[in-house]
Image (spheres, helix red, strand yellow):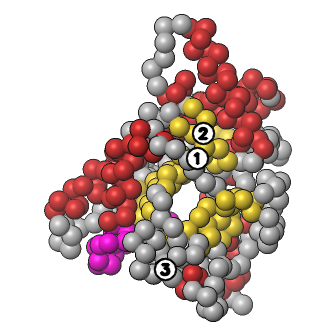
């Protein structure tokens, strides 16, 4: 795992040493993202205790609480806030494909802004203490809010490292990625809690046996920062060849965390490139196809369920983008709206058949 400490933690008094450490970190990170679109990182400054609390809160809410608790968080816009039940979303559409809905429960939180008119800023929907205990609600909200804030800050440092690496090697993209260096508190990043569990796609003989739990797709935003536990029922995979754009390819690679006691003292995160960053870099950083596959397990295994927290980094709605390939200028919100519209069109075409 790449050590992000030169960017995320306090540095020594030796300025030259700090600069060299950052250059090495940025080069190592960008090398991985250019090759495969994914990297493992550590040294973010996020404590193991905070990660443990966030994963525990996620597991309690998505796997152990009654469904009424989760449904107290239903919203009209579940793609941005609140609870999204099992089999209600379809990520295959993000790459223009048709397929069955994904088997994962989700819960989303994001930034709240009373002064913003953007649909990307809206109130969060937390579970009600009327259907869940006061202590459970308090622990869930405090753990997720703190994790969201700390991970968002770490993501800003990771983006700074990515920009430094690009500027060191490819000045052609300096102007287009400059927008990434001007982050504000008006960001649109969304933290998504995900819960996978034993189901029909784990059962031999069933129609959907060993079909993906989440179909092959790319992520819409800038970067994604992912944390997950050791639940056995699911595994994250990326295409073996990052240049592949065909979701039907049979060449996939499991993304596994390194062996060792990293999690206790220094959690390891998965970072991958989103579509927006890939477009801003003219494709030099790859938004790589990835999916979630079922893994053999038993229904009554205590450690079967998997819990994950994925931070999808988004820019300020009015941030000005210049796309190198087309030369187009637009705001981040306009770019994102167009990207989602293409996926929505696929779903509509599928539903009309």
Left or right placement of residue 88 versus residue 323 in this view = left
Mark 1 or mark 2, which has the lower sequence index?
2
Name the residue beneath numbered marker 3: 298
Name the residue beneath numbered marker 1: 258
| Viewer-nearest residue: 79 or 225 | 225
Q: Which residues are magenta?
A: 61-79
How crowded is the residue under tag 1: few (<14 C-alpha within 10 Å), some, or many (20+)?
few
Look at the numbered disc 1 and give the secondary structure of its residue.
loop
| Viewer-nearest residue: 35 or 118 | 35
Mark 2 or mark 3, which has the lower sequence index?
2
Report the number of numbered marks: 3
Residue pictured at 81% horizontal, 68% vertical: 249
Name the residue beneath numbered marker 2: 1
How crowded is the residue under tag 2: few (<14 C-alpha within 10 Å), some, or many (20+)?
some
- In which image quadrant can residue 134 be found? bottom left
Look at the numbered disc 3 and give the secondary structure of its residue.
loop
In the image, residue 153 above or below residue 269: above
Where does residue 139 sit, x and y in percent of width and height?
A: 24, 55
Residue 77 highlighted magenta (yes or no): yes
How far is mark 1 from mark 3, CA to CA?
A: 25 Å
How far is mark 1 from mark 2, CA to CA?
A: 7 Å
Give the quadrant of the N terminus. Answer: top right
Left or right placement of residue 144 versus residue 304 in this view = left
Is residue 276 something that shows in the picture?
no
Residue pictured at 48% horizontal, 8% vertical: 13
| Viewer-nearest residue: 215 or 328 | 215
Left or right placement of residue 258 versus residue 99 in this view = left
Residue 139 highlighted magenta (yes or no): no
Residues at circles 1 and 2 in contact by the CB criterion of under 8 Å? yes
Tag in front: 1 or 2: 1
| Viewer-nearest residue: 51 or 342 | 51
């Amino acid at each position: 795992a790449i050590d992000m400490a030169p960017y995320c933690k306090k540095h020594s008094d030796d300025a030259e040493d700090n600069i060299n450490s950052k250059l090495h970190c940025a080069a190592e990170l960008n090398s991985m993202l250019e090759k495969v679109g994914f990297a493992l990182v550590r040294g973010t400054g996020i404590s193991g205790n905070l990660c443990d609390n966030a994963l525990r809160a996620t597991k309690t809410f998505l796997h152990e609480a009654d469904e009424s608790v989760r449904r107290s968080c239903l919203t009209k816009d579940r793609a941005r806030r609140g609870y999204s039940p099992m089999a209600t979303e379809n990520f295959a559409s993000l790459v223009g494909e048709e397929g069955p809905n994904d088997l994962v429960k989700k819960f989303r939180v994001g930034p709240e802004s009373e002064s913003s008119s953007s649909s990307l800023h809206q109130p969060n929907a937390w579970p009600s203490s009327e259907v869940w205990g006061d202590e459970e609600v308090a622990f869930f909200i405090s753990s997720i809010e703190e994790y969201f804030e700390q991970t968002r800050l770490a993501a800003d440092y990771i983006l700074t490292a990515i920009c430094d690496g690009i500027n060191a090697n490819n000045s052609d993209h300096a102007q287009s990625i400059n927008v990434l260096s001007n982050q504000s508190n008006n960001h649109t990043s969304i933290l998504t809690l995900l819960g996978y569990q034993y189901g029909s796609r784990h059962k031999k003989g069933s129609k959907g046996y060993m079909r993906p739990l989440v179909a092959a797709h790319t992520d819409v935003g800038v970067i994604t920062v992912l944390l997950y536990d050791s639940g056995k029922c699911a595994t994250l995979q990326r295409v073996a060849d990052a240049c592949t754009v065909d979701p039907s390819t049979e060449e996939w690679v499991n993304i596994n965390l390194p062996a060792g006691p990293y999690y206790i003292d220094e959690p390891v995160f998965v970072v991958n490139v989103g579509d927006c960053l890939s477009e801003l870099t003219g494709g030099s950083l790859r938004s790589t196809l990835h999916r979630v596959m079922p893994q053999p397990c038993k229904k009554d295994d205590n450690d079967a369920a998997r819990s994950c927290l994925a931070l999808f980094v988004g820019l300020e709605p009015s941030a000005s983008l210049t796309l190198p390939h087309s030369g187009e200028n637009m705001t981040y919100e306009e770019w994102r709206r167009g990207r989602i519209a293409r996926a929505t069109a696929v779903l509509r075409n599928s539903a009309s058949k």
